[in-house]
Image (spheres, grey):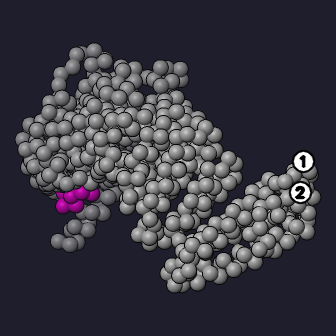
């Protein structure tokens, strides 16, 4: 009876006088009694699978409404505290806190006992003018809806839910206070997520008001509006298709505005993260086939995220969220819609730089991997157009940036990975068309100037790097294409540009050229060596003798090239693969050329020739007995060489040959 008395009886502060300590203590005790009693009934209801049989009788519901009002009054009073700005002692503050806690827990317990139709008190509380009471209404509504969502949707009367949605939508539209708007949007989000699928017709009218808060946001309201919008999209589904021209542009503008600054502040990044988590996932999960008019804008925003490698972006895990949405987009959108949007984004990616282009190519790879193989075959022309953009990337850089190898290398690696994924889903004719176009482009003539030479090397480097993934994947199946590209590889192996002198203040150093790849020719040589090693490892048809002799001379020449110190393992790998492919008898010309190179004037060339002989014998042990007699005189002459390193290499190889010959003779 004390709690069910008029509010003034338990909240004298409402009448202008603060309740005494005794009154507060008595109220706390009464609330504690009520809470324990209600919780026991709630546990009993949980065991039986529903509220007590008498909980929906008019008498019980009326008593529940009165008790609800009394508990709300106690919570409100405890939230306000004493009037007159009185400073509270620690004991008084603890007492007010206990009063507030007991009131809220009692409200939660009462909320769990009431039937689904007990919504009007929550709606009235949501319309309260104080933010604390509105937040309490959201908490109670969330607890109510999560108690037994499936059962509630069946039990809840349509007119009760319609009234709740109507009140909530009205608050979203009419209230001016940001805190009230936020509470109403959160309540609408909860209602739509739990009941929108069962009663979608009740929520259609709420979308315009929600979008208004997205388009003209208050910082306190924006995230709640994005949550509500995503809930409505997920719940209403195809019912929203006629309204997409109205709500999609504001949604996309909000994401674009958040990402527009060169370095977006943390608040803007949080908005972008909320958009991706909510609206992005909802749109792609519910309306993927209807998004094609908006895909170019959505794709550009996702690509823009690849540029934001800042501490603030990493702090909100924006990269992970963007990748998750990108993967969903690649899987949900059919190729006939997504690939044209990707083609449209090539220009943007080329201007934005390597990270954005890499993101676009990885999106192509993910799309091809997750969609049915028939789509890649049907739209291979568009897929190859995307891959050609990665192939052309290096050569399209400004002249003074051609030597910046790290950024184009990342694009080439992404293109190579995507091509390897695509090739497994295409027929030979389709890949042959792409290969023929790429080979013609890489071998196209350029002018005789230094810029033309750099452009020619850039094309060769891109071509052989992009093919590397496919060559490793196809192995012997790549043999016909290896034979077609071998003349181009030989031509670049036989051309050596003068070494580039780099000073501390040079333009190239200021642009940040990669120390691991000092110039294009070194990078091209490494790519060519890898191409040759992979090609000759997988049993190709033997090239014509003229090509073999040219290749052997070019390889030996590169072994003595001064910058090749960092490339020796790759070049020796190519020599070994070539020797293994030719066999003991077929490698005689290669062995002879290596022996002759030990007499070259250049010290590096002599050392390289000895290393080449050593790799040949390691690869073909039987060649020791057959060919070592030819090599011994040359190696013996090197024992008197002026270069100590050349003498040491020759002595080591002679000892190896002696031991190998002794072992072979013992076996015989």
Residue 379: say if magenta: no
**Front residue of this view, candidates 340 and 3:** 3
- Which quadrant would the C terminus be assigned to in this image? bottom left
Tell me what residue is drawn at x 27 percent, y 39 percent: 292
Disc 1 + disc 2, Cβ < 8 Å: yes
Instruction: Indicate which disc residue 84 carries.
Output: 1
Magenta region, main secondary structure:
helix
At x 63%, y 40%, the residue is 177
Residue 557 visible in the picture: no
Question: Horizontal and vertical percent for residue 386?
Answer: 24, 37
Magenta residues (range): 616-623
Q: Secondary structure at mark 2?
A: loop
- Disc 1 element: loop
Viewport quadrant of the N terminus: bottom right
Residue 109: x percent and y percent?
A: 64, 72
Residue displayed at 44% across by 52% down = 231
Of the numbered discs 1 and 2, the one sitting upstream in the chain is 2
Residue 595, disc: none
Question: In the rendered image, which residue does mark 2 sit on?
Answer: 18
Q: CA distance from mark 1 to mark 2?
A: 9 Å
């Amino acid at each position: 009876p004390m709690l069910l008395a008029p509010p003034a009886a338990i909240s004298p502060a409402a009448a202008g006088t603060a309740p005494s300590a005794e009154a507060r203590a008595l109220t706390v005790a009464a609330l504690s009694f009520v809470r324990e009693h209600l919780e026991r009934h709630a546990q009993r209801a949980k065991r039986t699978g529903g509220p007590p049989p008498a909980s929906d009788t008019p008498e019980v519901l009326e008593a529940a409404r009165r008790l609800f009002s009394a508990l709300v009054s106690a919570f409100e009073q405890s939230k306000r505290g004493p009037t007159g700005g009185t400073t509270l002692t620690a004991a008084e503050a603890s007492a007010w806190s206990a009063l507030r806690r007991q009131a809220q827990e009692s409200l939660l317990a009462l909320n769990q006992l009431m039937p689904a139709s007990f919504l009007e008190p929550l709606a009235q509380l949501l319309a309260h003018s104080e933010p604390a009471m509105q937040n309490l209404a959201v908490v109670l509504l969330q607890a109510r809806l999560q108690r037994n969502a499936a059962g509630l949707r069946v039990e809840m009367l349509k007119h009760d839910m319609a009234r709740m949605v109507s009140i909530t939508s009205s608050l979203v539209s009419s209230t001016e206070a940001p805190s009230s708007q936020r509470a109403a949007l959160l309540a609408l989000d909860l209602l739509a997520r739990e009941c929108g699928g069962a009663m979608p017709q009740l929520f259609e009218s709420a979308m315009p008001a929600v979008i208004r808060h997205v388009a003209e946001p208050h910082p306190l309201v924006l995230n709640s509006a994005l949550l509500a919008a995503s809930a409505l999209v997920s719940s209403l589904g195809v019912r929203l298709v006629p309204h997409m021209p109205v709500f999609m542009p504001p949604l996309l503008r909000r994401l674009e505005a958040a990402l527009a600054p060169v370095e977006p502040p943390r608040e803007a990044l949080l908005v972008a993260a909320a958009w991706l988590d909510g609206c992005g996932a909802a749109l792609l999960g519910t309306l993927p086939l209807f998004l094609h008019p908006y895909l170019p804008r959505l794709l550009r925003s996702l690509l823009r995220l690849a540029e934001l490698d800042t501490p603030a972006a990493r702090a909100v895990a924006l990269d992970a969220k963007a990748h998750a949405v990108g993967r969903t987009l690649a899987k949900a959108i059919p190729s006939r819609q997504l690939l044209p949007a990707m083609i449209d984004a090539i220009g943007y990616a080329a201007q934005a730089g390597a990270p954005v282009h890499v993101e676009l190519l990885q999106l192509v790879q993910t799309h091809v991997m997750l969609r049915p193989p028939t789509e890649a075959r049907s739209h291979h022309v568009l897929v190859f157009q995307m891959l050609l953009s990665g192939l052309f990337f290096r050569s399209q850089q400004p002249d003074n940036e051609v030597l910046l190898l790290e950024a184009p290398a990342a694009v080439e690696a992404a293109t190579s990975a995507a091509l390897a994924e695509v090739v497994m889903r295409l027929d030979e004719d389709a890949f042959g068309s792409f290969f023929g176009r790429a080979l013609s482009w890489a071998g196209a003539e350029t002018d005789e100037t230094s810029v033309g030479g750099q452009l020619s090397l850039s094309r060769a480097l891109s071509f052989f790097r992009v093919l590397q993934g496919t060559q490793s994947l196809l192995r012997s199946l790549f043999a016909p294409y290896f034979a077609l590209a071998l003349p181009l590889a030989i031509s670049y192996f036989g051309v050596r540009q003068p070494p580039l002198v780099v000073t501390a203040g040079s333009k190239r150093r200021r642009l940040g050229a990669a120390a691991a790849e000092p110039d294009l020719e070194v990078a091209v040589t490494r790519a060519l060596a890898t191409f040759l090693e992979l090609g000759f490892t997988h049993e190709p048809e033997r090239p014509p003798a003229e090509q073999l002799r040219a290749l052997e001379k070019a390889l030996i020449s590169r072994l003595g090239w001064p910058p090749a110190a960092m490339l020796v393992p790759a070049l020796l790998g190519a020599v070994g693969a070539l020797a293994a492919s030719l066999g003991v008898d077929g490698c005689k010309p290669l062995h002879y050329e290596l022996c002759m190179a030990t007499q070259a004037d250049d010290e590096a060339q002599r050392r390289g020739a000895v290393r080449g002989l050593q790799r040949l014998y390691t690869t073909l042990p039987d060649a020791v007995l057959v060919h070592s007699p030819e090599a011994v005189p040359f190696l013996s002459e090197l024992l008197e060489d002026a270069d100590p390193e050349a003498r040491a290499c020759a002595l080591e190889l002679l000892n190896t040959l002696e031991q190998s010959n002794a072992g072979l003779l013992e076996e015989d």
